[in-house]
Every structure is written in C-alpha cells, then in structure tokens.
Image: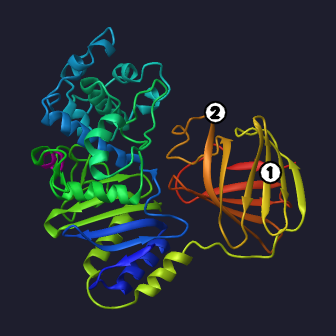
Amino acid sequence: MGVYVAEGVNAQAVEKYVRDSVANGINPRAFQVLKNNKPLIRMAFEPYRFDEPMHLYSLSKSFTSVACGICVDEGLLSPETKMCELFADKLPAEMTDALREMKLGDLLSMQSGHTACVLHHMRWADDSIKAFFEQPTTYKPGTTFAYSTAATCVCAAAVERVTGKKLVDFLDERLFSKLGIKKPKWLECRDGQTLGGTGLFLSSDDITKFGVMLYNKGVYNGTRIVSEEYLADATKSHSVDINNGSIDWISGYGYQFWLNARGGFRGDGAFGQLCLVFPEEDIVITMQAEAGNMAKEVELIYELMDNMLGEGGSVEALEQLANTLYAPEKSAPFNSELEFGVEDNYAEVRKLRLFGESLLHIELETDYGKKELVCGNGEFLLNHIMLKNMTPSITILDPAVNTVERLSVFAAYKINENGSVSVTLRHKNTCHVQHWTIDPAEKKLSISLLAGDMVCPEFKLI
C-alpha cells in the first residue's frame, strides 16, 4: 500500500506539500511521519516502495555515530580516544602536533583539522586510513568545522579496530537485527575499509525504524540499543558550520547529526535523504527523495508539520497522486530502426542502435560487450544493465571511475514532435533520474540530471 493517512490528518495539506515539493525540484520517493511512535502519514510514489533499499549518502554517518556510541557505552572507545594511539601503525614517519592531539570526538564533530574532506585521497589508496593521516592539517583538531566524509570513514575504522568486526557486521548484531532490518550493503574503499560516511543502503521503513529508536532515546521495542547519555551528547552542538548560509546547516553539529533550526536533530544525506527527530514535538519524519535544494526541502517539511493536522482533502486523492506523480507520458510508438556510431567516450560505447515495436530497445555496443535497455511507452520497465562511468553521483570522483557498474533502472520513452526520443531512467537503488534525449538530426545523445554529476553527460553520434 503506497498511502496511509491517520485519522485527523489534513490530506489536502499533504497533497499541497507534495506538489510544492515537486514544483521546487524536490521529488519525493517515499516519506513517513510519526507522532508519539504512531504513523500519521506514509506515502510511496510509483515505481518506488517503502521496503526498497536505496543509497543514503551521508545519512550513513548517523549510523556510524551509533556504532561509535555502542563502543563508548562498552568502554571500547571514548570521544577522548586519541587517534595516534588507536592507529599507531597507520601514522606517517613525521608526526605533527595535530596528529598527536586528534581525538575521536574531533572526527565525530567534523573538526579533524583539515580544511576540506580528503576522501578522494583515501578511496583508491592501498591503505585508506594511512592516506588520511598523511594529509596535511591546517587547524588544531577540535577547533574548526570542515565537513568530511573522510573523518567519518576513520570513525568507522575505529569501531572496526576495537571490535575486530566489519562495521556492517557489528551493526547487524547490535542495531540492524534488533530493529528488524535485513543486513544491508555498505560500500567500501578499495582496500576494504568501510566508507562509514556514505555508502549505506537502507529502505524507507529501515530509516523510519532508526528514527523511532533515536526518538525513544536509544530504545527500540523495549530493547536498549545505545545509551541515552551517548545520544544526548551526540545530538547537542559540538561545532558549527559558519560558512553555510542555510539556517538548518548553521544551527550546530553534534556527533554525525545536524541540529534543526526548529529544534531536535537529524541525519541527512545528499539529494534529500533525511531522518528528522523532533523530541519536543514528538515527531519523527523520514524522507527518500531526489532534491536539488535541501534547504527548501526542510523548509517545506516544516510547513507540512504546521498544517498536517485538521480536516481537508481525501485519501483517494493522495492515492491517485502517489500512483501518477511520476507516470511516464505515452506517445506514438517507436516503430523503426536507427543505428549510429559513437565518438570516443568514457563509457566506451561504440555503437548505438534503437529498434522496436511499441517497446523501445536501446542496444549499446561497448568495449565490454553488448548491453540493452528496454523502455516502456507510458509505463516503466525495470532493467538491470552493466555500464561504465554511467552512474550519477555526488561528484565525478565519487563512483568507481573506470569500472563497470550495475545500474538498476525503471525505463520509459516517448517520441517528441521534432523526431527526437526522450528516455527517462529512474534509478531503483540510488536517488537519481537520468533524462536521455537522442536526437538523430543533431547526431547527439545528451543526458541531464536534477541532482548529481556524471562522467559522460553527452555522446556524439556518427
């Protein structure tokens, strides 16, 4: 069921929230609102589901924080734990004062001493943690905020070092299984180090269970996961991002949690992945989305909170909206065959062939074999296809550049009046949508995204 609205919820306000979000470039996939541990609103928009795991991006950080908290509770770690002592075997030959002073709490609060994230130095290194400590620092650790997924990666490494387990295995035992969450996928650096600050895949239902646990001060269904004391410390301000002008990003930063301008705290990930907790209002809100403007996304959530109770609208209207919001437009069918050569490109696509009757088949001849997408007309068809440098991401440095990756996408097409072909690819497990325009007259295949970046945004056809 894609829609649930509790009695006393203003369905008209919910519909307005969804339409305002889309109008502002914030495309929700699934969101849930709970009050006093009870669901108020649940909406999932076709073709997406509440139980489908999706990349959380930096919302992953809050899960790493809880892992650190469990270790703190057990005396294995402390915010005062010095990195030079925990990772003595990873340090450069020439020690600096910054390395001698750097503590776990500095990394958790994004105050490692670096001026910017150094993950790109770690991601493909032979030894990712050693690569982190080799990067020069400008500030005294614990004094200056610089948002750093690399710092979170080291927090994950700290958990793995003191527990002797992979982060995902440790959390499977101590968090995921207790929340009724199937052991998830968590991406790694090349050397096998869990990324920690990104790379976790969980569903809307999974994020909501996590939010309920946070709201209940570390308890889920009567089981203590992490101490109330650690969460109180993790969700208070330890640092401030003074350079970010958005009010919800200058309200303070805890241990891998942001403080909300409205009160409470949240974990958030790129392009709109959110887990917001408002203890004073007894509200938990979780969101999976493709958002180009997260400040506006949060602003509209606040507006929903102010207007969601009362009378108005209908559940039937919300169900219709959930089923049709992203429904692809139907056009005249593709009933021909086109074939093009492709100029040199990073995806190593050499030939492009379009054919079909009603369904559109896009055959890509690559250096690593023939690949095919099948696109519906007025409907999405699920495809699994292996392509190189064709995965959208936060930056072009983020994906496994120059490796062939699996894309799971819902695909649909339409024929435009000028004879070009528009193809929509909605990624199933990441918050991205690719819009392809194949223009035979212009001899070009161009790709646009609402959010993210690509190594190959254009192909020149021959």
Amino acid type assigned to the residue bearing label 2 in the image: Asn
Q: Is residue 396 left or right of residue 155?
A: right
Q: Closest to the observer: 245 or 237?
A: 237
Comparing marks 1 and 2, which lies closer to the viewer? Answer: 1
Colour theme? rainbow
Tell me: residue 154, above or below residue 241: above
Farthest-out residue, top: 93
- At a point 41% along the width and 56% down the height, the residue shown is 203
Q: Is residue 30 left or right of residue 359?
A: left
Q: Closest to the observer: 175 or 350?
A: 175
- At a point 23% along the width and 40% down the height, the residue shown is 109
**Which numbered dot is residue 220?**
none
Quadrant of residue 85 in the image?
top left
- At a point 28% along the width and 52% down the height, the residue shown is 179
Farthest-out residue, left: 229
Tell me: residue 351, above or below residue 98: below
Tell me the quarter of the image containing the N terminus.
bottom left
Question: Magenta residues?
Answer: 231-236
**Which numbered dot is residue 402?**
2
Tell me: residue 330, above or below residue 225: below
Secondary-structure class at tag 1: strand
Q: Give how far across and how far down residue 49 sits, in percent.
A: 48, 64
Please say if the residues under marks 1 and 2 sit with CB atoms less than 8 Å apart: no
Quadrant of residue 79 in the image?
top left
Examine the rendering and report whether any part of residue 146 can be seen: no
**Which numbered dot is residue 363?**
1
Secondary structure, magenta segment, majority class: helix
Q: Is residue 235 magenta?
A: yes
Q: Give how far across and how far down residue 397 sits, in percent.
A: 53, 37
Q: Is residue 447 magenta?
A: no
